[in-house]
Image (tube, helix red, strand yellow):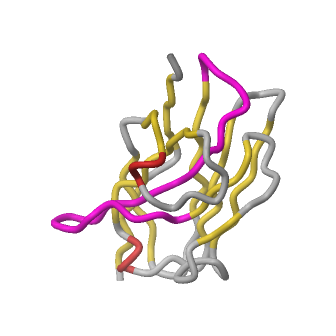
Amino acid sequence: QVHLVESGGGLVQAGGSLRLSCAVSGGTNYVMAWFRQAPGKERIFVAGSTLSGGAAYYADSVKDRVIISGDNAKNTVSLQLNSLRPDDTAVYYCAAGRRLFARQPANYDYWGQGTQVTVSI
């Protein structure tokens, strides 16, 4: 059973940055991804990679502002969010699956509890 725990969310002003982390336990060789869900909206893909941070892929809407990275030794995957905008406000979720380059939530088997990111004007 894979267990994912996110951290690093918070309140930030527009234009600022945040670094989210996801601690992974209970499994290896998974494809890792970050999704986000704003109130009243569906959960959407943000970025994905292998646990080591290789083969990174991004949603077109954020690819110039986010970086996904991984650390096999620490079993963590991180998401650097830059130039944040109010419409980036959402709960950000870490997910683990087996299909590289997958962008649909249904392709991911394990989910963290989420971490709130709020961007103020």
Residues drawn in magenta: 25-46
Q: Quadrant of the C terminus?
A: bottom left
Residue at image point 59% right, 66% down: 81
Q: In x, y percent, where is residue 20? A: 57, 50
Q: In x, y percent, where is residue 70? A: 76, 45
Say left or right for 45 vs 90. Answer: right
Say left or right for 4 vs 118. Answer: right
Residue in front for this viewpoint, 81 or 77: 77
| 26 to 106, vertically: above or below | above
Residue at image point 41% right, 73% down: 88
Residue furthest left as drawn: 40
| 79 to 118, vertically: above or below | above
Residue in front for this viewpoint, 31 or 64: 31
Q: In x, y percent, where is residue 97? A: 56, 40
| 32 to 81, vertically: above or below | above
Residue at image point 52% right, 46% down: 8
Q: Any magenta on residue 62?
A: no
Q: Residue 26 falls in which quadrant of the image?
A: top right
Residue in front for this viewpoint, 82 or 4: 4
Residue at image point 44% right, 59% down: 104
Q: Any magenta on residue 37?
A: yes
Say left or right for 17 vs 5. Answer: right
Q: In x, y percent, where is residue 53? A: 78, 50
